[in-house]
Image (spheres, grey):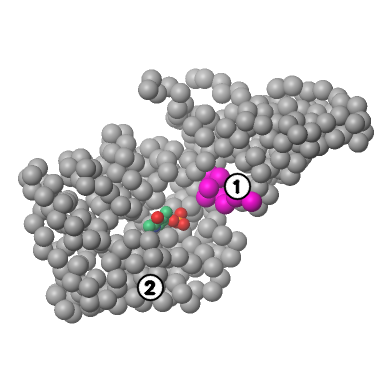
Amino acid sequence: MKHYSRVRAEIDLDRFDQNLLAIRKALPDHTSVIGVVKADGYGHGAVPLARRMQECGFVSGFAVATAQEGLSLRRAGIAKPILVLGYSFPEEYEEMVRHQISAAAFTDEMLEQMSRAALSLHGEMGVHVAVDTGMSRIGVEPDESGAAFLNRAAHTPGICLEGAFTHFATADERDKERTNCQFSRFVGLLELAKKRYGVTVPLRHASNSAAVLDLPEAGLDAVRAGIILYGLWPSDEVNRSAVQLQPILSLYSQISFVKTLDAGREISYGGTFRTESPTRVATVPVGYADGYPRGLSNKGEVLICGKRARILGRICMDQFMVDITHIPEAAQGSPVTLIGQDGAERITMEELGEKSGRFNYELACCLSKRIPRVYRSGQKTVAEKDYFDDPG
Ligand SMILES: *Cc1c(COP(=O)(O)O)cnc(C)c1O
């Protein structure tokens, strides 16, 4: 096992299991969970987490953003259904048919090209019709044209209509009026398709994480749970008591250098921080190239020996400095917690988001591939992912 002293993200798989169970408990029995593992599982590592979810009866499949992400799950032996939520490109269809990766469909041209790809391989393309009920991103309209499209999807050779979905734009806001509106448009379209054409859709799904927390009754056949799997919150307006979540990722480093600076010394690029009195300063060998936001310059804090140490000056690409004047026991080699718990103190992705002016989703996705991921269960390391091991 490697040491990863400079920086490592530890992902707690036991907490991940607990999050999954908590989500399950909040949903009606007939509603399954589609694990959203796009963007490498929001930076947490899609493969190890999908492997963990494979074992779970109530996880009916996985959702990703791109065909490539789906293929990488298949290469890792993930066997459950995989849906690409975004636009899939025609040149990807054959590969998707071969590996049974389902696509979102929303134009006739897509249906035709998918059908052609499937028939050329004597296979089938699984399709979920995307319905635009208010996000204005992708999807058919929830009207007669959408119902007719569902009918065509159901009857195009080579196409298997597996599901239909819509996506909420404001489910993370306290006021659920627009979300309820989107939901009734979606359900209305499914009813219309049934009434006009007798089309029934096997898997109907609408909810994202925020709707899982606040509108469990919108669960339909499945929910697409993303951010809450990782123990992070969709926003600060959702009900945080609905589901017991715990963040699963911690980010650790070590002090690389310690010195005491006299009053009047400037710290880091631009000299934006100036010591006013003798200051004990520690260097941390992590920077914005690791995805640690530069916006935390002169604002953020880290945990050292169970205490908060504030960032002095600008975050560099690969290093930054913190004030440890009040932590005499801190020394070169002392552990530094950038995200996670140390003693009674805790720094969350949400706190970093607020302080850096970024979004917790974005922070998680942007933890760079320079950070190795270490997977822990029962106090033991059970898997590791070092992106530099890939020979390229
Ligand atoms: C990303 C995404 C989700 C998951 O959203 P969370 O807020 O992370 O739960 C669900 N559905 C679609 C279409 C998405 O793009």
| Mark 1 CB within 8 Å of ligand 1 | no
| Observer-nearest of 143 and 182 | 143
Q: Main secondary structure of the magenta part?
A: helix
Q: Earlier in the sequence, mark 1 or mark 2?
A: 2
Which percent across, then down, holds residue 225?
A: 42, 55
Amino acid found under the numbered disc labelled 1: Met
Tag on residue 349? 1
Left or right of 259 on screen, residue 380: left
**Label drawn at residue 183:** 2
Q: What type is the residue that disc 2 sits on?
A: Phe
Image: magenta residue range: 357-364
Q: Is residue 84 visible?
A: yes
Which of the 4 quarters of the picture holds residue 94?
top left
Quadrant containing ligand 1: bottom left
The relative height of residue 42 versus residue 137 in the rendered view (above or below) is above
Residue 67 x, y percent position in the rendering: 29, 44
Q: Is residue 358 magenta?
A: yes
Rendered position, 233 above or below 327: below
Task: State which quarter of the image contains the C terminus.
Answer: top left
Q: In which quarter of the image is residue 322?
A: top right
Magenta segment includes 101: no
Local crowd at mark 1 within 10 Å, few (<14), some, or many (≥20)?
many
Describe residue 325's horizontal placement relative to residue 39 as left or right: right
